[in-house]
Amino acid sequence: MTELATWLPTYLPIIYFLTSSITAAPATSSPSNVAQANYGVLLDAGSTSTKLKVYRWNQTTGDSLVPRIDLLANERFDNGLGSFEEDEIGLVSYISSIVSRAKQDVPDHKQKSTPIYLMATAGLRYLTEKEAEVFLEKIQAVLANTTINPFLYKSSSITILSGEEEGVYSWIAANYLNGFFDKYRPENETVGILEMGGGSTQIAFIPHGPLFSEEYQAIVAGRAYQLYVQSYLQFGANAISQKVVYALLHGSLNQSEVENPCMLREDSRNTTLDDGRLILEKGTGDPEACLQILRKFLHPNTGQDCSPKPCAIGSVYQPSVDNLKFVATQAFTYTPENLKVVDDDKILHIDKLEEAAIYHCNRTLEQAVNESGMDPQYVSSDCLMGLYIPTLVTLSYGFNSNSTNIQLTSKINGGTVDWALGAMLVELSNSFGSPKFNYSIQCTKGMPAVTTGYNKGNHSTSLHSNHLQICVLLLSLAIVLRNCIYFDISKV
Ligand SMILES: *[C@@H]1O[C@H](CO)[C@@H](O)[C@H](O)[C@H]1NC(C)=O
Ligand SMILES: *[C@@H]1O[C@H](CO)[C@@H](O)[C@H](O)[C@H]1NC(C)=O
Ligand SMILES: *[C@@H]1O[C@H](CO)[C@@H](O)[C@H](O)[C@H]1NC(C)=O
Ligand SMILES: *[C@@H]1O[C@H](CO)[C@@H](O)[C@H](O)[C@H]1NC(C)=O
Ligand SMILES: *[C@@H]1O[C@H](CO)[C@@H](O)[C@H](O)[C@H]1NC(C)=O
Ligand SMILES: *[C@@H]1O[C@H](CO)[C@@H](O)[C@H](O)[C@H]1NC(C)=O
Ligand SMILES: *[C@@H]1O[C@H](CO)[C@@H](O)[C@H](O)[C@H]1NC(C)=O
Ligand SMILES: *[C@@H]1O[C@H](CO)[C@@H](O)[C@H](O)[C@H]1NC(C)=O
Ligand SMILES: *[C@@H]1O[C@H](CO)[C@@H](O)[C@H](O)[C@H]1NC(C)=O
Ligand SMILES: *[C@@H]1O[C@H](CO)[C@@H](O)[C@H](O)[C@H]1NC(C)=O
């Protein structure tokens, strides 16, 4: 039988950072001031591509505490930054092409005062601390060259984000787009966030009850919010599919084929595992067997291993989601759409999704394509995700299966809920502040967080270790916590 992932308890009481209150722009600004637009450039460096985002905002006017930020450019450049680790010439031309594209959206006279940020996520997390340091220096040298980069650049503008930071930024973005920060409102009007990428999945919210661990402090417009944040590294949409295959292999190293109950009958595919092996998966379309595998990955510990209590996945602590409202983005949204269980209100009906998935998984590939006109390439992943999402949110996160508190959407009021928007808001609001800052610095060091993936047998043990140092700048008017040094090493 397969063995459940062993989770070592994670302990990270981390003081998180940022945002000052916005002191700029009294309502009496002259008309030319009001029309004065400001810009910000952000490079989101992922594992397979870098996304360029150019934002524009006006000084705030009237009562709003935060400016409205528009996304002017959102362009993808193939190949992750990581692929240039050993190729300096390639790195220069890659960054140059991205910067040139950004210049098209920012007027010449504004470029020198427009900040540029490079934030790496999964793309660079696999580097060791030393490798990351060396590589970041190379990137810094390119961005510091004013012939290549006309934008305002500081060495602190390049960071590697942890999964938890992504979660906090997405939480800020969701609540910002909801208008929560427009004026002072009670904390219980914030929404929590559930996001799922290929590799990891994040949950972030302000619990009603006490918060014993995994606490991050986000300071937005001068007010501090105590968030619970957790990022599960091997629980993204692609990662969970691999975990299922590893579970089905029962630790066998010579097997090249598995029968997969989470795929539809008659469907098959070749999968390259992250240890390099090629496995032919053949669907048996057995939703109950698939659910059993998922429950083993997802069930919370209740005994001594779980401290503080309660736990979500394995021994990972999570306070109750109570009756809080959540927004679920990215890979949470696709399968419920494909299985046609979402109405206009975008509410995730957890029961309905599981029921639809059980029906869907129990079809043949041809039936699913015939009956529902689905793309044959994705039918089996809708089977897996249709079972995975309900199990994750009920068994692990603790939502009632009849809950209507999760809304499926990646957009709120026309803006995309992503960490990039939250990160930009935080960075930009630092620059809104008054020059007369009085600040002190406080640093806290997080304990290493180690999680091991499915590790029955002699493979697929992924060790993730966070080692970070976060510094806090306390300003007189507002409090700005700045991330001073940050490394995140993830080695497989
Ligand atoms: C900024 O102000 C200009 C002129 O008033 C307006 O056209 C533009 O839409 C505003 N942009 C934002 C992001 O508010
Ligand atoms: C800056 O980049 C230009 C163009 O690639 C190059 O010619 C120049 O030597 C670089 N300057 C420095 C200081 O590296
Ligand atoms: C928020 O809390 C206030 C008082 O603490 C209460 O009156 C209000 O109903 C709560 N709102 C929600 C959405 O829970
Ligand atoms: C795989 O190895 C086991 C012993 O380690 C052996 O019993 C089995 O026959 C092998 N299977 C294949 C398909 O080679
Ligand atoms: C999987 O790979 C094998 C060998 O390369 C090939 O014969 C087979 O057609 C592939 N199957 C699928 C479903 O891609
Ligand atoms: C699967 O489909 C068969 C008919 O094709 C049906 O008899 C069976 O009850 C279904 N099983 C589930 C779990 O829905
Ligand atoms: C799917 O549709 C094709 C063409 O319309 C038909 O020949 C086939 O019998 C259908 N298969 C099923 C399982 O309904
Ligand atoms: C949802 O389920 C819970 C527990 O099973 C129950 O207490 C609650 O009344 C149900 N709510 C609705 C709206 O059905
Ligand atoms: C700066 O901040 C410190 C600590 O908050 C405070 O003691 C000090 O009086 C402040 N200085 C000024 C000039 O505001
Ligand atoms: C695990 O695999 C490594 C090589 O990947 C091998 O050296 C080691 O002996 C294996 N250990 C066991 C217990 O099979």
Image (tube, rainbow, N blue to C red):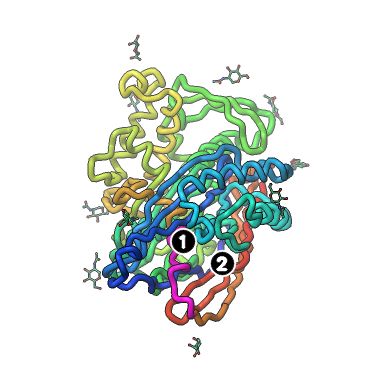
Q: Earlier in the sequence, mark 2 or mark 1?
A: 1
Can you tell which mark lies on residue 229? 1
Element marked by disc 1: strand
Residue at the spot of label 2 = 483
- Magenta span includes 204: no
- Magenta span includes 432: yes
Residue ID at (60%, 63%): 154
Label 1 residue near ligand 3, CB within 8 Å: no
Quadrant of the image occupied by residue 168:
bottom left
x and y, in percent, of residue 118 in the image: 56, 54
Q: Nearer the viewer, residue 26 or 412?
A: 26
Q: Amino acid at mark 2?
A: Asn
Residue range (magenta): 424-436
Label 2 residue near ligand 9, CB within 8 Å: no
Residue ID at (38%, 38%): 334
In this view, 174 is above or below 188:
above
Q: Residues within 10 Å of mark 1 (few under 14, many from 20)?
A: many
